[in-house]
Image (cartoon, rainbow, N blue to C red):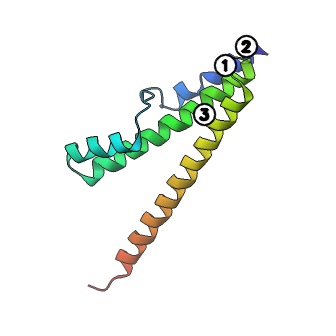
Amino acid sequence: MINNVNSVSSLSMTRGLAAIEQDSSTASSAAESAANDGGFGAVLSNVATGAVNTLKNAESMSFAGIKGTATTREVVDAVMQAQQTLQTAIAIRDKVVSAFLDVTRMQM
């Protein structure tokens, strides 16, 4: 069974997420670095990177829980944080799509 868990843990490598390093930066430090970079695109890039890192952390904690190296509390906290991050990303996506549709409906 452990061999099955090890093979599943390699899935993040096949998804192209391995190039993104896990970072424990806070939202304020991400906003400060984005302000230094100078643009809205930089802010979105930092937010997206943070979201991917949160999801990768939840995935690794889940595997650690299956292996028995992490407590149930740690696994639940990581998964709940990933769920909140995913819901935020979906809400932002919905707002962007809505704004795009409003722009396309404008008369020229």
Q: Where residue 3 is drawn, which disc sits there?
A: 2
Residue 7, disc: 1
**CB of mark 2 within 8 Å of CB of mark 1?**
yes
Q: Determine the CA span between mark 3 and mark 1.
A: 17 Å
* Lower position in the chain sequence, tag 3 or tag 1: 1
Residue picked out by circle 3: 58
- Above or below residue 30? Residue 71 is above
Q: Amino acid at mark 2?
A: Asn
Q: Residue at x 45, y 71 (%)?
A: 98
Q: Position of residue 19 (x, y in %)?
A: 42, 27
Per the rendering, the mark at residue 101 is none
Closer to viewer: mark 2 or mark 3: 3
Residue 24 in the image: x percent, y percent?
44, 31
Per the model, the C-alpha gap separating discs 2 and 1 is 6 Å
Q: Quadrant of residue 56?
A: top right
Residue at 27% in and 40% down = 33
Number of the front mark, 3 or 1 = 3
Give the secondary structure at mark 1. helix
Q: Which residue is at a point 50% across and 64% down the rendered structure image?
A: 94
Whether residue 3 sits left or right of residue 100 in the image: it is: right
Left of 71 or right of it: where is 88? left
> Amino acid type of disc 1?
Ser
Q: Nearer the viewer, residue 67 or 97?
A: 67
- In the image, is 14 to the left or to the right of 105? right
Determine which quarter of the picture holds residue 37: top left
Nearer to us in this view, 86 or 70 = 70
Question: Foreground: 6 or 30?
Answer: 30
Element at label 3: helix
* Gap in angstroms between the C-alphas marked 2 and 3: 20 Å
SS label for mark 2: helix
Q: For the residue marked with disc 3, what is the amino acid? A: Ala
